[in-house]
Image (spheres, grey):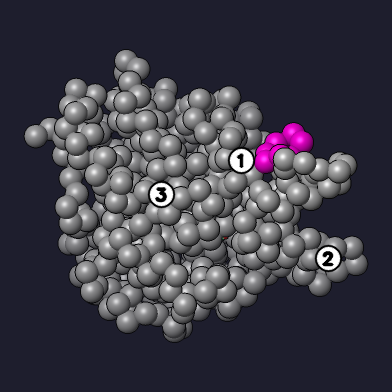
Amino acid sequence: MSAPVVSPWKQFQTKKEAYLAYANPWEKKIGSFLSFRPETPAPATPGPLAGLPFGVKDNIAVEGFPLTCGSKMLANVISPYDATVVARLKAAGAVVIGKTNLDEFGMGSSTDNSALGVTHNPWDITRVPGGSSGGSAAAVAAGLVPFALGTDTGGSVRQPASFCGVYGFKPTYGVLSRYGLTAYASSLECPGILSADLALVQSVFEAARGRDLNDQTSLDYEPQAPRPVKTIAVLGDLSDLHPDVRAVYDQTLGHLKALGYTLLTVNLPSLEFAVPAYYTIATAEASANLARFNGIRYGHRPVYSENHEDLVRKSRTEGFGNEVKTRIMLGTYVLRSGFQDQYYTKAQKVRTLIRRDLQKVFDQADLLLSPTFPTPAFVHGDQTMTEFQQKLADKSTVTANLAGVPALSFPAGLSSGLPIGMQLTAPAFGEPRLFEVAAQFATRVPVVPCPGTSLDWSK
Ligand code: GLN
């Protein structure tokens, strides 16, 4: 599919001192890693990714590294095994040099919900890198790694990619194994890839994908027969966009037209219910998935407890942050006996409607374009971006997770000095279309590196 990657990063091992002189000051400034081990030697594994260092979101298992999920609950856990995607990338020659910061268990859009560290956006350190894979996006944008893994449950790879000016790719559900990914909302999430280099995103995807017997929901990749993309759907009703996002969105439409694509205005009537459906399903699944963290088998142990019940209560009270507790309670609420029809079942029906609405769009168009997120990177603690506002703003990204289809956020330009990402969504197994259009777009609007960064270690 894509040419083998010939990257200056191949010099990573031989120019380690130059790398550290560059990386350490940056990392001090942005705090993208929870554990950072750039001295890790690369094994002499030949392969398409030989010698390439990468970062892994700290909710994906890497043998010998912590697996904290950004939570006090798991602050002391060291993983005894590799997630399947990590094992496959290692087998292709890549080397993990650290675990990146995230919103606790992947719950959030800023990385400010991490209990273990603060991450800043390399473009402007007063701003958030986005989330929940904010550490991965910041590390890539600062040139600390050529690519990083994140997880995307409702936009957590695409939104931080948009905030940090890099590509963020979420594949078709099942194509990247979830084995070794700490579950938050199993039916929605999957690993994703962040990089400033589109060809590298494809090479990493190629090396990591495919059926895995450890994940019963995993699939072999069956890309749709390539056909040139002609028509791109755009949404008729796009209100509530920040002016900077609106400006870049309008420019993007102009570029796509100039590239010869036909733009077709469509409506997704179910879109207004996407966020409530997502948060009903995601919290329901979270309340079940996080039940295992009780201080007995896993997790934080209180210093003293009276009995078993007291131990579990204290473990969870002390170990989880507020956002996680809110979601566990919400999830328990929507699942409580006698009320499932009112919330959970209804949300599943909306999920089906969304899938059908999207299918109708893909009957008429090859791809769907939208802004990734309605705002640029916001300032830490911005009072207008409350937890609630952040959830409403997940509108464009959650649809791909609800429908299980692939989506890519690509850097579409700068506005007021900050990068803005746009998102392409494809039908299941339509990944080649995403890469094709993003590559065409980059011929008109090349990716702008974050000021003061370098990806080139050959000098
Ligand atoms: N912002 C969304 C949430 O908080 C998405 C998170 C994610 O994709 N992990 O659930």
Q: Toward the viewer: 327 or 165?
A: 327
Mark pair 3, 2: CA separation: 36 Å
Q: Which disc is residue 74 wearing? A: 1
Disc 1, SS:
helix
Q: Left or right: where does residue 128 sit relative to residue 318?
A: left
Q: Which disc is residue 135 wearing? A: 3
Given the image, on which type of amino acid does mark 1 rest?
Leu
Task: Name above or below for residue 203 compared with residue 381.
Answer: above
Mark pair 1, 3: CA separation: 18 Å
Q: Earlier in the sequence, mark 1 or mark 2?
A: 1
Query: Closer to the camera: disc 3 or disc 2?
Result: 3
Q: Which disc is residue 340 wearing? A: 2
Q: Residue drawn 55% across and 37% down?
A: 67
Given the image, on which type of amino acid does mark 2 rest?
Gln
Q: Quadrant of residue 412?
A: bottom left
Disc 3, SS:
helix
**Disc 3: CA contacts within 10 A as few (<14), some (14-19) or many (>=20):** many
Give the extent of the magenta segment: 295-301
Task: Name above or below for residue 154 compared with residue 369.
Answer: above
Q: How many marks?
A: 3
Q: Position of residue 400 (x, y in %)?
A: 53, 60
Q: Residue drawn 19% across and 28% down?
A: 17
Which quarter shows the C terminus?
Answer: top left
Residue 276 visible here? yes
Disc 2, SS:
loop
Task: Name above or below for residue 325 compared with residue 378.
Answer: above
Q: Residue drawn 67% across and 36% down?
A: 216
